[in-house]
Image (cartoon, coloured by chain):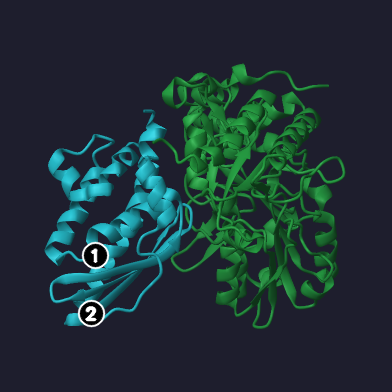
Amino acid sequence: MSGLEQMYQQVIIDHARERHGHGLADSPGRMGESFQVNPVCGDEVRLRVAVEGDRIASVTWEGHGCSISQASVSVLHDLIEGRTLHDASEVAAAFRALMDARGEPPDSTTENLLGDGAAFAGVGRYPARIKCALLGWMALKDALIQVEKEKT
Amino acid sequence: MTLPDVRGDFPILTRQARGGRRLNYLDSAATSHQPEQVLEAQDEFIREHYGAVGRGAHLLAEEATEAVDSARRDIARFVGADAGEIVWAANATSAINLVAAGIGAASQGIGGVEAGRFALAEGDEIVVTQTEHHANLIPWQILARRAGAALRWIPLDNDGRLGLDDLAGIVGERTKVVAFQHASNVTGVIHPVSTIVERAHAVGALTVLDACQSVPHLPIDFPALGVDFAAFSAHKMLGPTGIGALYGRRELLDTLPPAVYGGSTVKTVTMTETTWLDAPAKFEAGSQPVVQAVGFGAAVRYLSDLGREDTETRDRDLAERLRRGVSSIEGVRLLGPIGGADEPVIGLAAVHVEGVHPHDVGQVLDDAGIAVRVGHHCAQPLHVRLGVPSSTRASTQVYTTDDDIDEFLEALDGVRGFFKAGGSS
């Protein structure tokens, strides 16, 4: 597979098309929201989380951007919704580490943890595109901080 | 006359692109490459003549000063100006900011009575256009806010042409500054400078031209265009980064107050007062990028030697090939008019590819060794007006060939298929 084919795996193309969790929803629980922009291209994502107890009950979003950024938020929705805050931060850290791995394939533990997210390994080879893949994850991190602020 | 094949002058064009492919560089509107002649001029200057410019009584200081002065003269001649009308700036952005900040200073009473002609007051108006690069928009937004002036703009039509039907309504008695772009970095449109200048001067407004994209492509004579100020940048015209120039009509540079302060700009300094040197020195505070200035001079000599008419003709041919080509690809929309003999445009084409984000377009092209620009090209209001968030842009320079264009068109034609087929499986 060429670098290009490694980046645009079928699973990424599918997520970019299907956009799981697209459309902001109101949910019970403590809400947090974040709006992030990629200044290079103007891509935007607004991501909303609802936390009940220590569980992230809902992750929804809207925005526009390249297939990498859209697919990444879609995968984020699948991976994060329903997880505990602790598990979610573990997944987010694993995704970030995958981006820093410069295209190295993930080990089996990471692969299991990230599921469809493991398909983004190829993006790590293109520094300019890492920001695209991380846009939604930045929004998640910030939205969870907003939830914490709400609590205090 | 036709332009000779100059690719051999540009060492970087022989390197390989991703995957060992031939490099097809179509991003010259973002930044252009430097020929051997420009690289050598800088190298020789550093190795043999480098010293403090404009100060010092030794041989190197003298030679370095002469090299930089001679670069200024060559650049001035290149745009039809006198050497005293060319001010060094870090880039075109900084040149525009220099004018805006000078007007801001004058509005606060700095520069004495003679700077009063620049002063803005509450209720005055600054006019820009909807097609501006952010560099020729934000400084005026901020100046308007600082001075209590209103910001107005000339609208764009669906093809990226300026809507001048109501020019007299927009540029009126309260207008003090009209800042506008010569050629668009997105649509390629060359705007009718004389129409706007005529109206601006009829109401006594100053004109500031962003010539960043026009000087690299067209023969330019600023005094003939009639503009008061103009900004351009070396790195878009085969020169190095870190240097650009502000052109200003002599009498205006003489009275516009400086807005960046420091050494080499003063006649006398006491603990409380300063008097300025004449322009351009009063605007050039601190050590200047002199190596880059020498490179800039070499770049305009290189372009002059090629012949401005010949480079312009070549540029038009490339633009036509490029724009006709993209327009004939299904699912690809050219931003701006097609151009042609009746409506020449500069050598670039920004496109929207239906259903595929520019970042993804750029990535597929990069895989084929083709370097283009993706994003909003620092022109967000323009993209909003044309109804797309961002675009993919291919742009040309003297080293661009027909083959480069054809290869780009073929690759662009394959982009939608790549994503429709679902990338790899």
Neighbours of disc 1 within 10 Å: few (<14), some (14-19), many (20+)? some
Q: Chain of mark 2?
A: A
Neighbours of disc 2 within 10 Å: few (<14), some (14-19), many (20+)? some
The residue wearing badge 1 is A81
> In this rendering, which labeled residue sits more in front, label 1 or label 2?
1
Say if A144 sits above or below B82 in the image.
below
Where is residue B3 drawn, in percent x and y? 75, 22
Q: Quadrant of the N terminus of chain B?
A: top right
The green one among the chains is: B
Q: Is residue B90 left or right of residue B308?
A: left
Residues at circles 1 and 2 in contact by the CB criterion of under 8 Å? no
Towards the viewer: B67 or B90? B90
Q: CA distance from mark 1 to mark 2?
A: 14 Å
Q: Residue at x 61, y 27 (%)?
A: B407
Q: Say which quarter of the image contains residue B98.
A: bottom right
Q: Colour of chain A?
A: cyan
Q: Say which quarter of the image contains residue A152.
A: bottom left
Q: Amino acid at mark 2?
A: Arg
Where is residue B265 drawn, in percent x and y? 54, 53
Residue A30 numbered mark, or none: 2
Q: Chain of mark 1?
A: A
Q: Residue at x 70, y 59 (%)?
A: B180
